[in-house]
Amino acid sequence: MRATHIRRTAGAVISAVALGTLPSVAVAEATAQTAATAQRDAATAAADRRPGTGTVRHIALQGAVNVRDLGGYRTDQGRQMRYGQVYRADSLSELTDSDVATLAALDLRTVVDFRVPLEVEHDGADRLPAGVTATSRSVNDLGLYARTTEAIGSKDPVRQQEMLGDGRAEELMRSIYRSFVTSPESRSRFAAVLRDIAHREQSPLLYHCTSGKDRTGWMSYLLLRAVGVPSDTAARDFLLSNDFRREADRRTRDGLRRAGLMENPDLLVPLQEVRMDYLDAALDQMDDDYGSLHGYLREGLGLDTATLAKLRARLLRGGRA
């Protein structure tokens, strides 16, 4: 394997774990498997496990495992979200030519990337169909990238335990989720995506981060709730990332152990998973700062009544698209 490719793969490992999960390509390199085989197996296994809600439309790709159409969910008024308008995803940097063709068939107009510059540098830029507008709206990781880089790079089990064990990883994740509410920069970027979706010329639209679960998960929860999908349904969509990512994340931990980078890679589980505890941290912060979801949308994100109405009309069947 060429030295430059080894460095790129190592960078992808560190970059992805810094915000919760690692792409299975990193494990494939560590275990001498092909990236395409690892990703295909992970995507197939996740699709087989997904809950039978009758609404989840998974986009099966070889180079990404957590790509979904947000259509199909019903509001508390019984209206259904349109398919083919909004998609959520994990990193698109490892897509195959076949994957790019699959995305092209979705007629995407806009792809929004929440990754920070270091993630893009190490993991690679998105591979997108021709004609798609790529928009970077990075959401701050609060230094989690640097901390996780140091922990894995140390190869020291004691140091890794000190940095990630005994509840420290969980608190890192809760801090990031609270920052989705407290950070003006993060709020502005989430608000910009909602405005893009509300305007017809920007859609169909896909947004993503590295693992498609934290920044992407919060964005999806907000969008579903903003159009009237009940909180328990939006939370189930949030938690589905655990099903779609489970096999890829297991491969990652096994690969890190075999590569001698971590004696106890289970220290990463709290970073790899989504948990209601994390979502609740953001929701509690939202209530503290804005009193309610409505207050957060209006005051925190600066969305006026007309934009919220246009969002519902665009995405719900029975409305004026």
Image: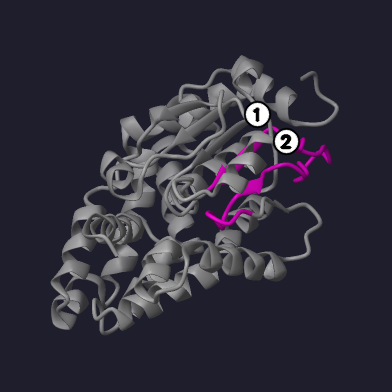
Q: Identify which residue is drawn at 58% across, 41% down.
A: 100
Q: Secondary structure at mark 2?
A: loop
Magenta stretch: residue 63 in it?
yes
Instruction: Tell me the kind of residue under disc 1.
Output: Pro
Q: Report the quarter where the N terminus lies.
A: bottom left
* Cβ atoms at labels 1 and 2 below 8 Å apart: yes
Magenta stretch: residue 125 in it?
no
**Residue named by callout 1:** 204
Q: Position of residue 80 (x, y in %)?
A: 80, 39
Instruction: Tell me the kind of residue under disc 2.
Output: Gly
* Range covered by the magenta-colored residues: 61-89
**Residue named by callout 2:** 84
Query: Which image quadrant for residue 160?
Result: bottom left
Q: Position of residue 172 (x, y in %)?
A: 29, 60
Q: Identify which residue is drawn at 85% across, 27% down.
A: 318
> Taking 204 as reference, is 242 above or below it?
below
Q: Identify which residue is drawn at 45% across, 54% down.
A: 211
Q: Nearer the viewer, residue 191 or 58?
A: 58
Is disc 1 surrounded by few (<14), some (14 to 19) or many (20+) residues within 10 Å?
some
Q: Identify which residue is drawn at 81% across, 23% down.
A: 319
State whether residue 143 appears in this view.
yes
**The disc label shown at residue 154, or none:** none
Q: How many marks are shown on the rendered structure?
A: 2
Q: Report the quarter where the C terminus lies.
A: top right
Residue extending farthest to the front is 2
